[in-house]
Amino acid sequence: MTLPALLSRPAPKPGISDIAPYVPGKSGAKGKRVFKLSSNESPLGASPKAMEAYRAAASSLALYPDGAASDLREAIAARYGLNAQRIVCGAGSDELLQLLAHAYLRPGDEAVYTQHGFLVYPIAIKANGATAVVAPERDHKAEVDAILACVSERTRIVFLANPNNPTGTYVPFDEIKRLHAGLKPGCLLVLDAAYAEYVRRNDYEAGIELVSQFENVVMTRTFSKIHGLAALRLGWAYCPEHVADTLNRIRGPFNVSAPALAAGVGAITDRDFVEQAIRHNEQWVDWLTRELTALGLKVTPSVGNFLLVHFPMAATRNAPAADAFLSERGIVLRRMEGYGLPSALRLTVGDEEANRAVVAALAEFMR
Ligand SMILES: Cc1ncc(COP(=O)(O)O)c(C=O)c1O
């Protein structure tokens, strides 16, 4: 930009105008009932305990929330056997990812994420003037060696979604340990475990063990997925003490609302509800994978609550055509161009009616 242009109006910091704004999943489409399967939300909604706590919070709306989120941190700590001092709550895990980038990235620094990694990472990296370095994936899976090959003297953060959105793939714990072992102590490894609760694999660990042992690992979690509280914006991070201290210095003093804190306690203590959501997901991820594969579509095996479905490149049976066909029938999936996957759509596991509707519609589309 020229000097006169710079002086004529306020200009954002370098890097910000390079950011491609995050595009959320569409919510509307023509049709009687709209099946919104575009944002990895829970088809089971929120736990009755969470909703009751949320309603009860309505009587205190004039009061600021507890800025320390003490009850929620205690409830999370009790649930997972953690040290509550090392938990930081945020307005969604998005806020925590942004705060981590804000706290640890300077202009000239680098941060690494993977080829089809969650798109909030490049936004957070660039917003702080740092350079986003993209590690290639193989078969839509993050690879430790490829990530380590991208790490330089300037790397301050490695962001890894495990499981990853939108691919649904995961990195086993042994490999995560190898990744951590390859990083210098001054480089932060951020394990974004937004979908951890859905994973049914013996070789998976969300990150708690590494955070407990090392000074440079953070795990982020969300209430938006299995707990069904996406509307409230609630997440948490498990951190080394010095990182929790840093985040607590820069976060807004009341960054999580009182209704969200109350609902979070209700949700985390409702173990039966979470179990029900896990069982539902397990059943329908398997069913959807089988049915879609039988239609001739390629489905990346997923440990999350969504599937990456690959369409042929053919002129009439491609992903944009499938998206248009489904939208006409009130079924909304997520387009994947922004993730560099133009021939795929991402499908969130819905309730039985939605799952059957999407398979029936895709059967018609593929005929
Ligand atoms: C991998 C990953 N991380 C973080 C988030 C953000 O979740 P939250 O709603 O807690 O901000 C999402 C949401 O889609 C996600 O897919």
Image: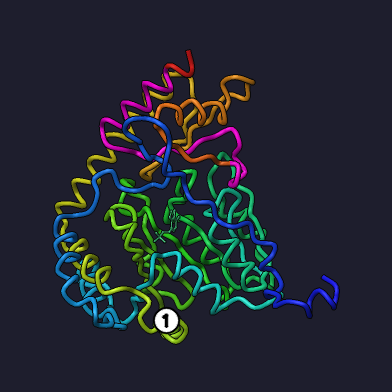
Observer-nearest residue: 222 or 185?
Answer: 222
10 Å crowding of disc 1: few (<14), some (14-19), many (20+): few
Q: Quadrant of the N terminus?
A: bottom right
Task: Tell me the magenta residue range.
Answer: 337-363
Magenta stretch containing residue 361, yes or no? Answer: yes
Colouring mode (rainbow / by chain / secondary structure / one colour): rainbow
Q: Secondary structure at mark 1?
A: loop
How far across and how far down the image is residue 88, in percent? 36, 76
Left or right position of 146 against 250: right
How far across and how far down the image is residue 345, in percent? 50, 36
Observer-nearest residue: 324 or 62?
Answer: 62
The total number of labels drawn is: 1
How far across and how far down the image is residue 59, in percent? 16, 74
Magenta stretch containing residue 143, yes or no? Answer: no
Residue 359 higher or lower than 60, as above or below: above
Q: Which residue is mark 1?
A: 252
Looking at the rendering, the quadrant in which ligand 1 lies is bottom left
Left or right position of 162 against 282: right
Specify the amino acid type for callout 1. Answer: Gly
Observer-nearest residue: 169 or 92?
Answer: 92
Residue at 24%, 69% in the rendered image: 259
Residue at 49%, 74% in the rendered image: 99
